[in-house]
Image: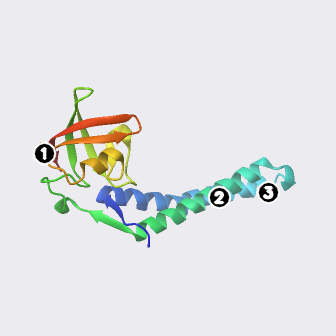
Amino acid sequence: MAKQIIVTEEGLKKLQEELEYLKTTKRKEVVEAIRVALSFGDLSENSEYDEAKNEQAKTEARISELEESLKHVKVISDSDVTTDTVNVGNRVKVYDEAFEEEILYTIVGSTEANPLEDKISDQSPIGAALIGRQVGETVEVTTPGGAITLKILEISK
């Protein structure tokens, strides 16, 4: 059985939009690229054809992946999100003791993670360590960059 994927309503919409784009626009673009490459003749030395076929395989694989993910998705709505403990859908303000700075993370499902926007997955080392914790608690997290200590200052929606 596939693992359940937790997403916000915004995350679900993005997955659905990506799937729609791949099935309609991207598929047509790839088929056109293959058609153009075929017109160049000899397939044994036709790198454009090989590239187009590789792109087709990547596109079809991503479509399959998205369709499978959408079968196992659990949407967390705003009404499901509370602020007593950290969970998917929360914004969590923490104090990083090593760097002596406050950081505001948004906890999201794995498909929505974007570290550049401080959106961290519930399955990432920091996200997993924060899940289920409360304001005032301090957590030790082992990250690829080493161990860090975070104190939870605030939990919001």
- Please name the residue that numbered disc 1 is placed on: 135
In x, y percent, where is residue 69? 44, 65
Q: Nearer the viewer, mark 2 or mark 3?
A: 2
In the rendered image, which quarter is residue 28 located in?
bottom right
Q: Nearer the viewer, mark 1 or mark 3?
A: 1
Give 107 or 78, whichever is nearer the viewer: 107
Q: Are marks 1 and 3 in contact (CB under 8 Å)?
A: no
Distance, label 2 to label 3, CA atoms, is 14 Å
Q: Are marks 2 and 3 in contact (CB under 8 Å)?
A: no
Q: Earlier in the sequence, mark 1 or mark 3?
A: 3
Q: How is the image coloured?
A: rainbow
Residue at image position (15%, 57%) is 82
Q: Amino acid at mark 3?
A: Leu
Q: Amino acid at mark 2?
A: Gln
- Please name the residue that numbered disc 2 is placed on: 56
Disc sitting over residue 38 in the figure: 3
Local crowd size for mark 1, using a 10 Å CA cut-off: few (<14), some (14–19), many (≥20) = some
Q: Earlier in the sequence, mark 2 or mark 3?
A: 3
Side (left or right) of 103 relative to 30: left
Give 144 or 95, whichever is nearer the viewer: 144
Residue at image position (72%, 57%) is 34
Local crowd size for mark 2, using a 10 Å CA cut-off: few (<14), some (14–19), many (≥20) = many
Disc sitting over residue 16 in the figure: none
- Helix, strand or loop status at disc 3: helix
